[in-house]
Amino acid sequence: MSRRGDWVYENNGGTCVAIAGADYCVVAADTRLSVGYSILTRDHSKICDLADKCVLASSGFQGDIKALHKNLAARELLYQHQHNKRMSCPAMAQLLSNTLYYKRFFPYYAFNVLGGLDSEGKGCVFTYDAVGSYERTGYSAQGTGSTLIMPVLDNQLKSPSPLLLPARDAVTPLSESEAIDLVKDVFASATERDIYTGDKLEIVVINKAGTKREYIELRKD
């Protein structure tokens, strides 16, 4: 398929998942970076530490993702100097939405999942489209494997409808260890069908004790 000479976007693949619990948040992404049928690297992190107990996982065009992460990190540093504290996860969620919407006529080709803890210590997940529309949910997936992963998460977690009254917390009923096991299972499943997802899984767990990382191997073919 031929492309116009002025086409500047490329989808480098990969999948990101986040699950929020009562007092934790799990954010995970694979480490494969691809173009077409070529794997550029098998060890590329898609997860960026941004604010206090808040991480961002992004899939899409690597150039735009790097530019977006650099922009957000600079804005967070300015916030620190002006307010003498780190930005909260909901505040970073609004900043990310504003940043994406500002570029809506020439958007960042990046599909983001933001996860962390809110001011009450509850897990929170914010999911985005490319131009800044976002929603707080109990779980989300973005990237090339998201269509394979979301049906499994919907079946296992059954997030309450936002139309139900009174409104209920958008957190999942799983314990932290159960959520980590579910993330490992859905990625193992997605790598069987999605050629852009694989090699290694990076899992970031955020709770009141802090942030910890874990890696497991995935399919390499």
Image (tube, rainbow, N blue to C red):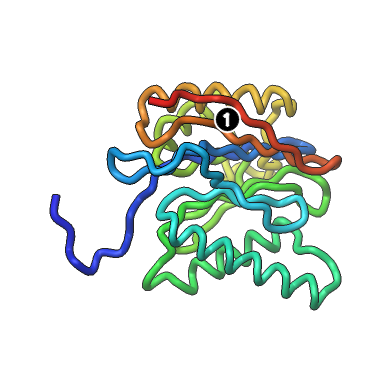
Work out whether residue 81 or residue 37 is closer to the camera in this orientation and state it: 37
The quadrant of the picture occupied by the C terminus is top left
Task: Name the residue at 47% across, 33% down.
Answer: 150
Q: Position of residue 213 (x, y in %)?
A: 70, 37
The amino acid type, in three-letter code, at marker 1 is Lys
Task: Name the residue at 79% across, 63% down.
Answer: 86
Q: Position of residue 144 (x, y in %)?
A: 39, 40
Within 10 Å of the Cα at label 1, are there few (<14), some (14-19), or many (20+) other Cα atoms? Answer: few
In the drawing, does residue 195 fall left or right of residue 71? left
Residue that label 1 marks = 158
In the drawing, does residue 197 fall left or right of residue 75? left
> Please, what secondary structure does the residue beneath circle 1 have?
loop
Quadrant of residue 33 within the rendered picture: top left
Task: Name the residue at 60% across, 24% down.
Answer: 182
In the drawing, does residue 164 fall left or right of residue 40? right
Task: Name the residue at 37% across, 71% down.
Answer: 106
Rendered position, 126 above or below 24: below
Q: Residue furthest left?
A: 2
Q: Position of residue 127 (x, y in %)?
A: 55, 50
Q: Position of residue 151 (x, y in %)?
A: 45, 29
In the drawing, does residue 169 fall left or right of residue 155? right
Rendered position, 93 above or below 186: below
Rendered position, 97 above or below 129: below
Across the whole image, how many numbered discs are drawn on residues? 1
